[in-house]
Image (spheres, helix red, strand yellow):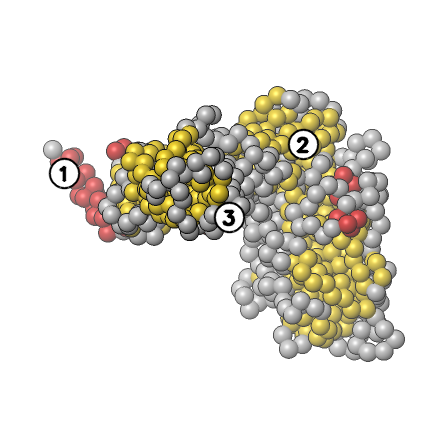
Amino acid sequence: MGRHRNLFFPCLLFTALLLACPGIQRERMGRIKATVSFETGLKQPRAIDPATLSTASPILPSGGWTPLSYTLSGSGPGGAAFVEETQDGVFSIECVPGEWFLDACVISQDNIELARGGCSCILQPGKASRADIVLYPLEGTGELSVYVIKNLEMSAGARLVGQLRFIGLPGQQAAPHPPVIPIDQPASNNELLFPELGAGYYLLSLELKTEDGFVSGGCAVAALVLAGYGSSGACSITMGLPVASIGMELYPKEPLAQALLSVEHSVPKGINALPMAVSRADTSPGDTVARTWYRNGREAGAAVPILEGPTLLPPNCFIYPPSSSGQEASISRIDFTEEANVSHRFGTSSQLLNSCSPTDGLPWKAMAVYDYRAAMGPSLCSKGGAENQGSGRLFRTRCAAASESGLIAVADFDADKYLHAFVAAYGSTLDASYSPGIQTVPASASWLRLWRSRIRADDPKSADHLAISKDGRFIAAAASQGGWIWLGRLGPDGGIVSTSYLSSSSTGDLGDFKYVRALCFSPCGDRLYAACSSSNKVYAFATLAGSLEYLHSKELKINEASSLPPADMILTASGLLAISATAASRIFILQDGADLEILYCLDNAGGNAGLYKPDALAVSSRGDSFYALCNKKTIVRFSKAYPASPYVQDGEIALSQGCEGARQMAAGGTGGVLSETLLVAGGGCLEFMDIAVDGSKTVSQLVYPGGTDPLGFADPASISYCRGAFLIAGGDTGTITVFGNTM
């Protein structure tokens, strides 16, 4: 008895805490965001619009047939349920996670139910699930009355002859043989009455004939009949004018617009190719589209909708089922089909995907290999003409850059002096009902092509340094052997809105602007920084107006000492510039405000003993830290203890044997809370390192080039990180290889 009494008070206290903390109770709740709309076919661009069919007004239901309120009810796990009503059809309801079945209806101003329908959705803890429910008129019967107006009275024996043809009810499959009601009555009878008609659209066609069969006039008008309502209107016949005639179909007959597929690429054997498609299908009211992928003529599964991704990702984007098996042949034909379930309109798009030799190792593995073929074919942002179509010949990949926005920029690739832009959907949320077990887009998913354009700074240029702003609004380009800098401003869809450039001249502030070694943007993209070895300076430019504006520059030196040439430059998490100076074993820390200011300079004295010949730099994905590749043999991490304190060395890692001599480095978070991944390259192989919170190396993986190094791993032109994947630009091999974590 005493033991039960001892348990009672802790349980009571725990219950009180739960009741007192709504946040604890609601942590696992989700939210259903639903939009319910009523569609009669009048609003759809491809649907019938009676107002454009004839000079006569369309015949519509009488009374208050427009929506007054929308009701949404739901039944979920464990008997959970709700019923909500709104006037605008927009609902936001907090619910327990699990599978929910939604039922919606529309009530008219006459308190008559106009439409009903529903759907199911999967609600995850702490997340929102969206549901768009379009309701169409209910089946049933209504009444139609038409008054025929004639400009002259006909002689005895004249007749009204024609037909009332059923077109269809939006939301219902079209009948193979729609009913036709014949009309033949004396012309003196000006009224047509149809007391019981099935709900839907009708086309009324009439001719006015004399006693001897001569047609003296006619009319045609469209009518909508709703269940429980009467529709009434007039049809005018003007004798002596041509007989009115209109053609009307509820569902168009032409094929669905062709979907845009992701770019062609190669997939290592054993990796599942994941092409993507952007649907351009324009459906009629009441119609739905089934989307299916095929590989080598065999069905691979239903297309998986991408629900939430980077802002550059277009709507109606679908991916190949991630759970399907991998490549079966050296060349696979991939088909994406769309079929309208009601009108049976059909559309298909196709592409070829190659297989290539795999790269050994886990967990980091090559997921996709891109070459000049990625610069060919249609684009999301059409620029037109030859500029939008690749040359179809292999060329070197000069460099690549990527950002968290999903934007990827590649210099050259298929022909000299071209810039290419793509969007990657890595990490985007998938529709769980179509993709059980795999919730996000993996690194094996293909890119969507945005555009192909020349870099023009007076004349066409070729860049070997690229930078992309964090939000994907700007792309910057420069050349290590040139004296120019180029800026491209992008719109919300990723298309180029405007371009701007500046170049060195014999006089002025940019007279010594040459030999760019690094580019980077400010956190919000309003400033662009360039480090040049010709003048040993860092230059700041404004970008917000969409054009480059030179602001100021700073020479890399301390006091009266000689200036030092920069090797690499990054922007730290706290918004400071870090610039490495290899020869002097220093890292300059600058702050940009009214002017570029050198706050201090890191050297290998004191606690920074590992700082020796720093070359490549990389920003940590955790905290305010960055990495420096030193003497091509070690990686040193610098961190801030407090926001106002300077950076100091707090970690040193030796590269693995076989990777010494590395020249490039990139860092990125891979989903783990306690580690991030560093990739170093250029020393003859790739080394992936998991870095713990304290800056130590926990796991290391080496990837060696195969054979004659067909992917350019031994000497890559650049490496970068994009939403959980690493991109290796292969230089003279003309390739970009995407590495993803398969664990």
In the rendered image, which quarter is residue 480 located in? bottom right
Q: Let me know if residue 185 appears in the view.
A: yes
- The residue that label 1 is drawn on is 5
Of pointers 3 and 1, the one earlier in the residue sequence: 1
Question: Which residue is at a point 37% across and 39% down the rendered structure image?
Answer: 156
- The residue that label 2 is drawn on is 350
Amino acid type, mark 3: Gly
- The residue that label 3 is drawn on is 240
Quadrant position of the C terminus in the picture: top right
Q: Residues within 10 Å of mark 2 (few under 14, many from 20)?
A: some
At mark 3, the secondary structure is loop
**x, y percentage for residue 3?**
16, 35
Amino acid type, mark 2: Ser
**x, y percentage for residue 429?**
51, 41
At mark 2, the secondary structure is strand
At mark 1, the secondary structure is helix
**x, y percentage for residue 570?**
68, 60
Question: Which residue is at a point 83% across and 70% down the rendered structure image?
Answer: 504
**x, y percentage for residue 545?**
65, 70
Tag 2 near tag 1, CB within 8 Å: no
Quick check: 418 above or below 559? above
Tag 3 near tag 1, CB within 8 Å: no
